[in-house]
Image (tube, helix red, strand yellow):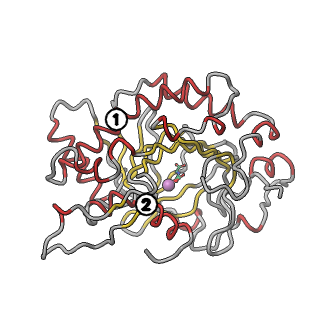
Amino acid sequence: MEVERVQAIVSSSLTKDNIPIEFIRPEDEQPAITTFHGPIPDIPVVDFSDPDQGNVIRSMADASRDWGIFQVVNHGIPFDLIQRLQLVGKEFFDLPQEEKEVYAKPHGAPSIEGYGSKLGRDVNGKKNWADHLFHRIWPPACINYQFWPRNPPSYREVNEEYAQEVRKVVDKLFKWLSVGLGLEPDVLKQGAGGEEIEYLMKINYYPPCPRPDLTLGVASHTDLSAMTVLVPNEVPGLQVLKDGVWIDAKYIPGALIIHIGDQIEILSNGKYKAVQHRTTVDKEKTRMSWPIFLEPPAEFVVGPLAQLVDPQEPPKYKPKKFKDYSYCKLNKLPQ
Ligand code: OGA
Ligand code: NI
């Protein structure tokens, strides 16, 4: 079965101000109607170069409790490497359609890896204005190079270098988020799979859209992951739901956007919140983003940490294998 890519729809069949009906969101989701414009605080920014480590830990913990998302600056990943990561990703999506299809997610494959567009539609029958590429980048035992573009030729080297750098940042994030809960530094990372945590890279490609007021790149969701580390390009589009309103994330060149995902919410017994977020698209420009989802191995059981549960604070979530949690979430079944 031929799957139609959003990028291909855009380059072929669009008239000036029409989009296919399956991309038009109901009014209560349309960005033009539901985006908040007014005085509102920005997503918190955490500066890793702050010499006061207590301050870094406190601001991360506060952001994870009140927002479920924060941006990190001075994280130590060279800006030049982030730019190279973006360039090789853009070069892949600029390839002719048939060359990208070589990496298509095989039909019916159990893994999410490969090039594609969201299969199926969501509850209200709508599609996302986006294509994507998924492939794991760490640990080595779970890498399938068949889904890594061979063109541009430096794609592999750049992604391997980025994986090494991002691991150092992830270790700090887990450590400081643990300490922020009053726990030993290694508890959260161990609770999410330790050295076996899988780094799933996704590239989101959001082509220009003649009616950005009516559609969404990705509809509202929380990430399944423990945590997500995202690099955006310069085209704004990420929005977060805060106190009942949708607000735009500010673009900070070189910053990493850290999302608390479902598994950290569960481990922390609800002390840290998975952020509800979505993306809008642009009329003229292509938006791209590079999230890495940090996921427990399929068979690994995640539940509230024993240290955070007592008679006053009973567990709010059931311990579950990550694969069972994912299955229920993707199929919209109760957990
Ligand atoms: C996602 C996502 C946000 C973005 O892919 O899960 O939320 O900024 N992406 O593209
Ligand atoms: Ni997301």
The front one of 90 and 297 is 297
Of marks 2 and 1, which one's residue comes earlier in the chain?
1
Report whether 74 appears left or right of 36. left
Report whether 171 appears left or right of 279. left
Q: Quadrant of the N terminus?
A: bottom right
Which element carries disc 1, helix, strand or loop?
helix
Report whether 333 appears left or right of 122. left
* Residue 282 spot, x, y in % from top left: 64, 49
Q: Quadrant of the C terminus?
A: bottom left
Q: Which mark is residue 169?
A: 1
* Residue 131 spot, x, y in % from top left: 68, 49
Q: Is mark 1 within 8 Å of ligand 1?
A: no
The alpha-carbon separation of the residues under discs 2 and 1 comes to: 23 Å
Could you tell me the amino acid type at mark 2? Phe
Q: Which mark is residue 70?
A: none
In the image, what residue occupies the spot 60% across and 53% down? 111
Q: Is residue 334 above or below residue 114?
A: below
Could you tell me the amino acid type at mark 1? Val
Q: Is residue 246 above or below residue 90?
A: below
In the image, what residue occupies the spot 26% across and 47% down? 60
Q: Is mark 2 within 8 Å of ligand 1?
A: no
Q: Which residue is mark 2?
A: 322
Q: Nearer the viewer, mark 2 or mark 1?
A: 2
Which element carries disc 2, helix, strand or loop?
helix
In the image, what residue occupies the spot 45% across and 49% down? 249
